[in-house]
Image (spheres, coloured by chain):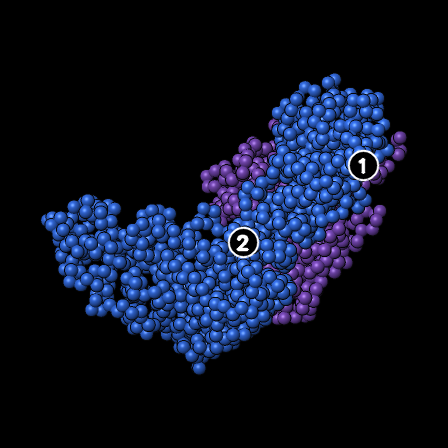
Amino acid sequence: MTDEVSIGGRTPRARLTRLGFTDADAATTALGALGDVSATFVEALARAADPDLAAASLASLAARFSRGELLARLDGDAGLLERLVAVCGASQALGAFLARHPEAADGLATARFDPRPMGATDVRKALVGASDKDSLRVAYSTQLLLVAARDLTDHATLRESAAELADLAGETLHAALGLAERRHPDAASSCRLAVIAMGKCGGRELNYVSDVDVIFCHEPADSSDESDALRGATRLASELMHICSDHTAEGTIWEVDAALRPEGRSGPLVRTLSSHVTYYQRWAKTWEFQALLKARPVAGDEELGRAYVDALSPMVWEASTRTNFVDDVRAMRRRVVEQIPVGQVDRELKLGPGGLRDVEFAVQLLQLVHGRGDERLRGGSTLGALDSLIEHGYVGRADGGQMGDAYAFLRTLEHRIQLYHLRRTHLVPDDPTDLRRLGRSMGYRVNPEDDLDKDLRAQRREVGRLHQKLFYRPLLQAVAALPRDGLRLTPEAAKQRLVALGYADPTGALAHISALASGVSRRADMLRSLLPAMLSWFAEGPDPDAGLLAFRKISEGLGSTHWYLRKLRDEAAGAEQLARVVASSRYVTDLLLRAPESVAILGDDDELSPRSRAALVAEAQAAASRHDHPMAAVRAVRRIRRRELSRVGIADVLDRLDIVDVGHALTDIAVATLSGALTAATAAVEDELGTALPTRMTIVLMGRLGGHEVGYGSDADVMFVHDPLPGAEDKEATDAAAAVAQHLRRSLAAPGDDPALTVDADLRPEGRQGPLVRSLASYTAYYARWSAVWEAQALLRADPAVGDESLCRDFATLIDPLRWPPAGVAAADVTEIRRIKARVDAERLPRGANPATHLKLGRGGLADVEWTVQLLQMRHARVVPGLRTTETLAALSAARDADLLATEDAVALEAAWRLVSRIRNAIMLMRARPAESLVEHTRDRNGVAHLMGYGADQSERMVDDYLRATRQARGVVERIFWG
Amino acid sequence: MGKQEDFVLRALEERDVRFVRLWFTDVLGSLKSVAVAPAELEGAFEEGIGFDGSAIEGFARVHEADMLAKPDPGTFQILPWRGETPATARMFCDILMPDGSPSYADPRHVLKRSLSKAADAGFTFYTHPEIEFFLFKGKPLKGQQPVPVDDSGYFDHTAQGGGQDFRREVITMLEAMGISVEFSHHEGGPGQQEIDLRYADALSTADNIMTFRTIVREVALSQGIWASFMPKPFTEHPGSGMHTHLSLFEGDENAFYEAGAEYQLSRTGRAFIAGILHHTPEITAVTNQWVNSYKRLIHGGEAPSYITWGHNNRSALVRVPMYKPHKGQSARAEHRSIDSACNPYLAFALLLSAGMKGIEGEYELPGETEDDVEALNATERRALAITPLPRSLGEAIRVMESSELVAEVLGEHVFDFFLRNKRAEWYDYRNQVTQFELDRMLPLL
C-alpha cells in the first residue's frame, strides 16, 4: 500500500480523491507545503470533516514554522495531529486563528491537552494574563480552540461543550471587568459591581457564537456616595461591553447585550440591588420573569451577585399567578413561532414552530407553571430543566428523553454550523460542500449529506410533536390515574397547565379528558395516545374548549367502533382534520354527532372529494327502491343526503373546495335526494291508487338550485310538471301527480335524525295561488297567455333535471324561447325588470338590516350581481349561445367573452359574488344557523374569519374586504344594470 | 406591558396625577375624551376601556357598538392648563374591537396603516404644519358678524391686541407638552394667527395638531376670547389654511434630496409630488372637508385654486421651497390647499398614499408652473393643461366617490361613512337661502 501512496513526497491525485479530498490539485500543493507526508498522515488528514480545508489550514500553519518542523511534531504526536485535523477541518475561522497565532497549537499537544472539560477556575487562570483588548481576544480564542478540540474529538458532550462555552464567556466577562477596573481605578473604587449572566450564558448552555446577555447590579463602595457609585458603575459596565465587542486587529469576541435589564435599552445600564428589587416587584412583566429563570452571577463582586439572585429568583415563581400570565404566555408563544422568511423554513434551526427556541420556551413555560409548587424544577439549562421535569413526573420519561435527544442533536448541528466561520447563524446551509462538511463533523461518513438530512428531518419531526409530548400527554395521567412512564401530575397542576395553554374552562376540559381517557378499555387506551395531539390542535383553533367537547361527544357517539379510533390513530391527517373541523364548524359537528360514521371520510383524499351526480342519483334510486315502506325509503335517501352533506362540509372547512365546487356538490346532493324521494313518493301513491301512476313526472330545479349554486341549509326551489299518459284522464292524472308532489314535500320536511329539506314551489306560475302541479299542456297554455317578464326571468334559472327524462326535454323546449327570446327583449320589459328590482331594493330589505352587508339584497350583494347577469342573458342569449346557462358565473364569463361586459367589470362582479357566497356558507358552517347579513357579533365574526382563512385579529380586514368587493360590484351594477 | 406603559404608571405617582384623559378622534376630526382614574389605567393598557361606539360620529356599525379605547403610552403628557398638583394627564388611544383587532373606523389606525405600508417600502413620512386660525372677541353669536380681536396684518407687531400674549401662552403650553414650535406670527387677516409646529413623523404631528387645537381653544377661553379654525370666516379676508411641508426619509436620508438635481429634488421627490398632483381631486373632500373650505380656495393669494406645482410660486398647490445650501435633510414639498379644520389623520394618510402611488407608478412630474396661475386667463390655463381643484364640496364628493385610492386608504367603513356624512352636509347647504341671495336678488327680482 505504502509505495502506492507516497511517491517522492507526493500522493497521486486519484488516491487523494478516493480518500475524500475534493480538489486534489490544491490538496497536493498543500501537502507539498507541509513536507514529506506519510500515508498515515494523509489518512489522518482525510478523516477531517473537510479534508481540503484541513490541508489548506495546516499548510498555512506550517508556513509559520521552519520547514518540516510542524510535520515532525505531528508525526511524533498522533493526538496533536488528530485534534488539529479535527479543528482545522471543521472551522475555517479557527484555522485562520492558528495561522496567526501558531503558539496556540501548543495547547493541543498531548502533553498539555486535557480531554476533560475545564472548570471555570481553570479558564480564569488561563485568561488572567490578558492585559489589553488584543491579548484578551487571543487568550479567548486559544481557550475556544481547546473547547472546540474536545467537542470535535468527542471528548465532550453537547451539554459539556455548551457549559464550557458559558464558563469561558463568564470568565471573559470577569477578565474584561478587570481590564475596565484597571483603566478606571476611580470608578472601580467607587462601587461594587456584579455582572449577572442571563439567557444561554446564564443557563450555562451557550453557543459558539451568540450575544452574551447580562444585567449589571452595583452598590456604592463603603466610602463613596450614591451618585459617584452610579457614575462609576456605569463607566465600568460600558467599558466592559466595549472591551468584549469592539473590533480590533484581533477581531471581536462577541456583543454583550444588556437589553434584558429593567426598562430595556431606555433604562439605566446599572442599578442598585434595591432598585432591581423594586422594579421587579412593581413593573416587571411575565417575559422578564421568564428571563430571570436563567440569571447567574458570573463576574465582579461575588457577594453582590449572590445577593441579587437570592433576592430576585423567588419572584420568578410567583409569575404564573399574575393576572395576565395566560395572555402573556400566548403572546410570547406567538412571537416564538411567528413567521420566518419563506424559503428558510426548512433551513432555520432556531425560529419557527418546532425550532430550538420553541423547545426552550416550552420547557421554561412548564418550569414557570409547575416550579412554583415544586422547587426541584428550578434549574437553569434547558436540558437540565427537562431532566428534572422528567425525573419528578411532569413529563413522560420516553417523551422527555426523545425530546432531549432531538434538542441536543439540533444544538450540535447549530454548533457545527457556527464553528465554521465563527459567525452567529442558525441556518442550515444549502451548499452541498457545506452539508458534507457538517455531516462528516457529526460522524456521518458514508453518505454525509443524505444521512444528515434524513436524521435532521427525523429529529425535527420529533420536535414538531413537542407540545403534545411535553404539554398534553402528561395531562392524561393526571386524570386517568394510570401511573406510567414516571408521570405524577396532580389534577391541580394539570389545570394550571391547561389554563396556560389557552383552555378557558380547565375543570370542564379535565372532565372531558378524563371521560375520554379513563378506564382500561381498548378505546380509552387508544384515546390516550390520540388526545395529546388532538388537544394541541384544538388549542390552535378559535375555541379550544368547544373543540374538545365536540370531540368527546363524537367519540362517545362512536362507542367502541373499532375503525374510528384506528382511523384517527393510524391516519394522522384524519385526526388533525377532525380537530380542525370540530373546533371551527358547528354545522359539520352537528352532522357528525348525528351520524358519527361520516368520520370515516376524514384523512382520505378520495373520500374528501364530492361524489358525482350520477353516482349519487343511482345510490338514492337504489335505496328508494330497496325499501317497500315509503317512509323507510325516504329515510334511506335522507341518510345518504346527510352523509354527503358531511362530506362536502368537511371538505369545505378543510379548504379543499372552491365555492363553485361547493355549489355543484350541494346541488347534486339535492338532485339525488329529490330523485330518490320522487321514486319513493310515486311508489307510495301507486300503492294507494292500486295502479301505476297515470302520468309522467318531472321536477324542475329553480332559483339557486337551478343555478347549481345552493348553500348549506338552502331550501330547494322547484316546479312540478307532469304529462298524462296516453288515454289517461286529465283530472285523474293531475290529482295523482299532485299527491306525489305533496307526499314528496312532506316526507322530505318531516322531522327526523337527518336534516330536513324544505321543498319550495313558490316560483311556479301564479305563485302560491296557482296549483302545485301543472301538466305540460297547462304550462304551455299559461305561458302562451299570461307570461310576465319576471316569470321569464325566473325561467333563466330553470333546470328540468329530475324525473322523466323525455318530459324534462319537452319542458326545456317549451321554456327556451321564453327565457332566451329569439327576438330579444322589449324595451318595456327591460324597464319593467328595472322597476321590479327598484321595488325589491326598497321594500324587501328587512327593517334594521344594514344595506351594506345584507348578503342577498345588500349593495353589491348576490341579487345585484345576479340580476345584472340575468338582464344580459335576456337581452343577448339569442345571439350569444354561452349565455344560455342557468349558472351565474358561467353566464358572466360568456358575457365577458362576447364583450358585453368589460373584463374588469366581470372581474368585479365575480369577485363580489364569490366572496359573498363564501361568507354566506362560512356563516352557516360556523354556527349552524344561516344569517341574512354579514355577522356582527365579535365571536361570530372571528369564527367566520377563521373559516375564511384570515388570521387571528384580522376580522376587521375581512369586513373591509367585503365592503370593498361589494362596493366595486355595485359600481358595475349601476352602469350595466341601471345603465 | 412594555417599558412605556411602565413609565406612564410610574409618572402617575410621581406627578400626582388624579385623572387621565383618554383622547381619540372621530371620523370628522373632532377630539373625544374619556376620563379615567389612574387605578383603571393598568387595565386600560392591557385591554382598553370599553365604550359605546355608536355614540361616536362614524365609529360603530349597527348592532355591536362595544369598542375599546387603548391608550398609546408614548403619547402620555400632563395637561398644563389643568394645574400642577393634582395634575391631569392625557394619552391618545387606539380604538379596538372587542376581540382586540384594530377598528377600521379609527382615523388613527387609518394613518397607521398607510404609514406601515410606506414603511414596508422603506419610507418614514414627516410633516410640518403651519396652522392658521382666527381669534374673536367672545364667542360669536348666531346671526351676528364675528368681531376679530385686532385689526393688524401679516407679521404686524400688535401693541394692544391680545394676540402676542395669546401666542406666548399657547407656545408655552405646547412646549410643556413636548410639542416644539418653529415659528409664530400674526397672519394677514384681522385677528388671524399662525403657529408652525416643528416637523415630526406624521402620526406624532397628527396627534400634535389635535392637541394644538385643544390648547388654542383652552387658552382663548381662559382669556375671554374665542378661537376658530373655520377655513373662511370672512368674505373679504384670507382664510385659515394649514400649509403642510411633507418629506420622506429612507433611514436617516431625506429621500427627496439629490445633490445637483433641479431644486435638489430627487426622482423620488418628483414622483411623490406627481402622485399628489394626480390624485388631488380625489382627496380634496378630505383635505378640505367642509362646505366652507371651498370659499377659501377661491380667494387666490395663499390659497391655491389650481393643481400645479412650482418653486417659490405661491399660487401653486405644491411648492418646492428653496433649501439652504448643505441642508439636504430639509428637502421637502409644501402642500398648500389643506386647511386647519381637516381631520389630520385622514388627510395625512391620503397625502402620503397619493405620493406613494406616484413613487410606485413612477409618475412623471408635469412641468413647473412659474406664472401666477390666477393671473392667467382660461385659455392660457388650458394651453398649459392646468386643471382646477374641485370648486365645491359637492364636486369634491363626486370625484372621491369613484376613487379606489381613497377607499383603500380610508378603509371601506370610513370611506362610506365620510361620503354619506358629506353628502348630507352638501344637501343641507344647498337647501339654504343665503344672505347673499337675499341682498342681491330680493331688490331686483
The crowding category of the residue bearing disc 2, from other C-alpha atoms within 10 Å (few below 14, some 14 to 19, many at least 20), is some
Give the SS element for disc 2: helix
Judge whether residue A364 can be spotted in this image.
yes
Name of the residue lying farthest toward the bottom: A222
B224, above or below A730, in the image: below
Q: Position of residue B49 (x, y in %)?
A: 69, 60
User: Crowding near pointer 1: few (<14 within 10 Å), some, many (20+)?
Assistant: few
In the image: residue A161, left or right of residue A866: left
Q: Nearer the viewer, residue A910 or A641?
A: A641
Residue nearest the observer in this picture, A319 or A669? A669
Task: Indicate the chain on which mark 1 is placed.
Answer: A
Q: Along the horizontal axis of the image, is A115 left or right of B278?
A: left
- Residue A724, position as x, y percentages in the image: 79, 25
Quarter of the C terminus of chain A within the rendering: top right
Front tag of 2 and 1: 1
| Closer-to-camera residue (A857/A675) | A675
Instruction: Report the residue at 21% width, 65% height from top.
Output: A109
Q: Position of residue A555 (x, y in %)?
A: 61, 56
Callout 2: chain: A
The type of residue carrying mark 2 is Arg
The alpha-carbon separation of the residues under discs 2 and 1 comes to 48 Å
Residue that badge 2 annotates: A566
What residue do we see at 32% from left, 51% from top?
Answer: A448
Give the residue at mark 1: A688
